[in-house]
């Protein structure tokens, strides 16, 4: 993994943003606004947080790969920026922020259950499910400010997935095929559980936008399949490439 390249990416990405016009006219009905405010407040809580546990784990387990720890810090700061954008959206839709929720507690407990790689995996699953959520909102809701925020978050989350993918590729390079299969199975089970929890939590808002369970699930499953394909495609490429090199 080229940690330095990721550190430079996150540094550059901080400067690349135009602040939405939060006072722009509101085109949405009161009912939809209330559903969105409540749902977004849960995501706002999920996107906030300091990451000190993650940094400590990373410093211990990556043999002091300082650029990786630096990139992780900027990644968490970027999630904090998402939390700030969501906070403004919640206010725009007339809602209130929350400071605790059972899904957040579940997420935090899962993150800290095992070591660094498991924590990265839990974060990655949240990125995949979150991507589906923001994509449905962007497709279904006609508010230019929500659209602008979703655009920004979706662009960042795509890079976050690539960042975690890079980290996990290094781990996978040292696994036997049967260990990779076991990892893939547990990943898919955890992803499926997280997707169901997200639907339970956000179904009222998603339904209020006109979306259905099948749409949200298809988007999220597509993200998961693309991620797993990228992980194995690169491995296949590397095997092929090293085979050619030794011929
Ligand atoms: Fe985020
Ligand atoms: Fe993210």
Image (tube, grey):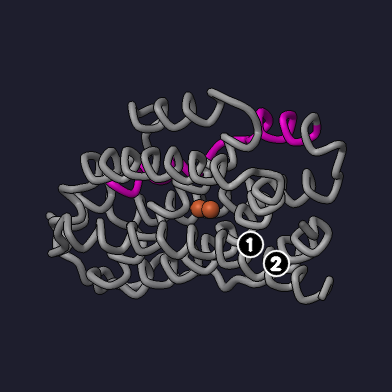
> Residue drawn at (49%, 39%), measured in percent from left and top?
182
Q: Looking at the image, can residue 160 be seen?
A: yes
Q: Horizontally, is 127 left or right of 38 in the view?
A: right
User: At which x and y percent is residue 230?
Assistant: 54, 65
Nearer to us in this view, 27 or 130: 130
Q: CA distance from mark 1 to mark 2?
A: 5 Å
In what quadrant of the picture does the N terminus appear? bottom right
Q: Bounds of the magenta span? A: 39-59
- 34 vs 142: above or below: above
User: At which x and y percent is residue 135?
Assistant: 34, 66
User: At which x and y percent is residue 65?
Assistant: 85, 44
Task: Please identify the dominant SS of the magenta region.
Answer: helix
> Residue drawn at (74%, 36%), measured in percent from left and top?
58
Q: Is residue 145 magenta?
A: no
- The disc placed on residue 235 is 1
Residue 225 picture quarter: bottom left
Q: Looking at the image, can residue 74 be seen?
A: no
Q: Is residue 45 magenta?
A: yes
> Residue drawn at (58%, 25%), measured in percent from left and top?
114
The residue carrying pointer 2 sits among few (fewer than 14), some (14 to 19) or many (20 or more) residues within 10 Å by Cα, namely few
Q: Horizontally, is 139 left or right of 12 in the view?
A: left
User: At which x and y percent is residue 226?
Assistant: 45, 65
**Residue that numbered label 2 is attached to:** 238
Q: Are marks 1 and 2 in contact (CB under 8 Å)?
A: yes
């Amino acid at each position: 993994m080229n940690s330095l390249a990721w550190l430079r990416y996150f540094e550059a990405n901080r400067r690349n943003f135009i602040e939405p016009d939060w006072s722009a006219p509101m085109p949405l009905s009161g009912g939809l606004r209330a559903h969105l405010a409540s749902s977004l407040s849960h995501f706002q809580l999920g996107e906030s947080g300091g990451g000190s546990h993650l940094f400590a784990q990373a410093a211990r387990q990556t043999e002091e790969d300082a650029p990786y720890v630096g990139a992780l810090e900027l990644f968490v700061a970027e999630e904090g920026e998402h939390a700030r954008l969501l906070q403004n959206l919640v206010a725009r839709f007339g809602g209130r922020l929350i400071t605790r929720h059972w899904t957040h507690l579940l997420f935090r407990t899962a993150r800290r259950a095992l070591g660094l790689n498991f924590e990265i995996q839990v974060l990655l699953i949240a990125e995949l499910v979150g991507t589906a959520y923001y994509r449905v909102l962007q497709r279904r809701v006609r508010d230019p400010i929500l659209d602008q925020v979703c655009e920004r978050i979706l662009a960042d989350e795509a890079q976050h997935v690539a960042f975690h993918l890079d980290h996990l590729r290094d781990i996978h390079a040292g696994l036997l095929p049967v260990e990779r299969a076991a990892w893939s199975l547990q990943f898919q089970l955890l992803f499926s559980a997280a997707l169901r929890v997200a639907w339970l939590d956000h179904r009222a808002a998603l339904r209020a936008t006109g979306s259905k369970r099948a749409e949200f699930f298809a988007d999220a499953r597509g993200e998961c399949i693309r991620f797993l394909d990228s992980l194995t495609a690169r491995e296949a490429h590397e095997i092929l490439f090293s085979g050619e090199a030794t011929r």
